[in-house]
Amino acid sequence: MQKLWRTARDLLMITIGCGLYGFGLVTVNIANHLAEGGITGITLLIRFWWHIDPAYTTFLLNIPLVLLGYRYLGKRALAYTIYGTVMLSFWLFVWQRLPVSLNINHDLFIAGLLAGIFGGVGSGLVYRFGGTTGGSDVIARILEKQTGTPMGKSLLIFDIIVLGISLSYLNLELMMYTLLASYVFSRIVDFTVEGAYAAKGLLIISDENQPIAQAIMAELERGVTYLDGEGGYQNAHRQVLYAVVSPTEVAAVKRIINRFDHHAFISIIDVHEALGEGFTYARPVRRLLRSKS
């Protein structure tokens, strides 16, 4: 039952994400003559040159890419990719036939921002729940799995290539606003996929590990883990403290460390997602009166 619920949730969010992406493409990009990157940009080129509906070309151009994904993606990811491709074609077909529009008074700067926001949030939702909208998304997901390259960066590179071709029908002004949309798109994608609020992980090496750990647990109510380490210079065994805190608590942790050891080594890293029992991004509420039971 839990697996069925998760699949239903994923498909619903992919549907919503494709709907947002398609809405932005039709009501912002096409309405304001802005181009697009990746395979979607190619469908707009075909629309300009041969007046073929992007809803159809999106589906047709994705067939060979889905076959490529069959080799590199798992069954679940492939199924979600096929579903995302079909949903994007569906929403492009629907939004072009519904009487919906955004009145932005032909302000191309606003159009560029909105195109990036709608596309980034929509695509980010699709990626976050395991799908893609086909096209260059498939290649970007393969690169992410094989090389660890963030999808937003890969998509930005693909966008630049297609946008260069789009100069065949865009003037320089429209191209610059399209580049603005592409940059906003890539940032919003990473923001949506990774989450809006990254935690901070601290690796602490000190001769006063015990009192530092006790103070963090007592004053911040955050858990601390002891890791075994070995110094590379003297090969001496050292304990390393690891703690995950909210960004607002980093300064408090530094004060605690300095209280006990001014020479402690501290490495602070971004934790884009923290899961598990007991962790919350909110700072624990400290009560003035505690139960003694």
Image (cartoon, rainbow, N blue to C red):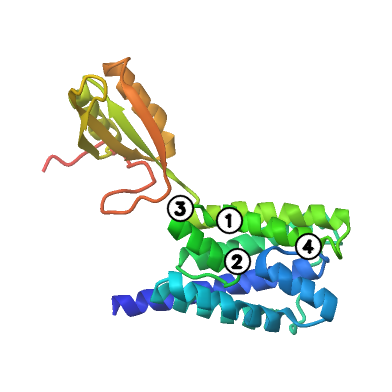
Q: Earlier in the sequence, mark 1 or mark 3?
A: 3
Answer few, some or many: residues within 10 Å of disc 3's Cα (few below 14, many 20 plus, some between 14 and 19). Answer: few
Q: Which residue is mark 4?
A: 165
According to the picture, the residue beneath numbered tag 2 turns out to be 136
Q: CA gap, disc 1 to disc 3?
A: 10 Å
Q: Are marks 3 and 4 in contact (CB under 8 Å)?
A: no
Q: Viewed as shown, does residue 222 lie left or right of 249?
A: left
Q: CA distance from mark 3 to mark 4?
A: 28 Å
Q: Residue at x 78, y 83 (%)?
A: 52
Check whether the beta carbons of the residues at disc 1 and disc 2 lie within 8 A of each other: yes
Type of residue at label 3? Gly
Per the image, the residue denoted by label 1 is 154
How crowded is the residue under tag 4: few (<14 C-alpha within 10 Å), some, or many (20+)? some
The reply to whether residue 126 is in sight is yes
Q: Residue furthest right?
A: 171
Q: Quadrant of residue 130?
A: bottom left
Residue 61 placement, left or right of 246:
right
At x 43%, y 70%, the residue is 73
C-alpha span from label 4 to label 1: 18 Å
- CA neighbours of label 1 inside 10 A, class few (<14), some (14 to 19), many (20+): some
Residue 165 lies, with reference to residue 58, above or below; the image says above
Mark number displayed over residue 121: none
Q: CA distance from mark 4 to mark 2?
A: 16 Å
Mark 1 residue element? helix
**Residue 26 visible in the current orientation:** no
Upstream in the sequence, badge 4 or badge 2? 2
Q: Mark 3 or mark 4: which comes first in sequence?
A: 3
Q: Earlier in the sequence, mark 1 or mark 2?
A: 2
Relative to the observer, which residue lies in front, 182 or 233?
233
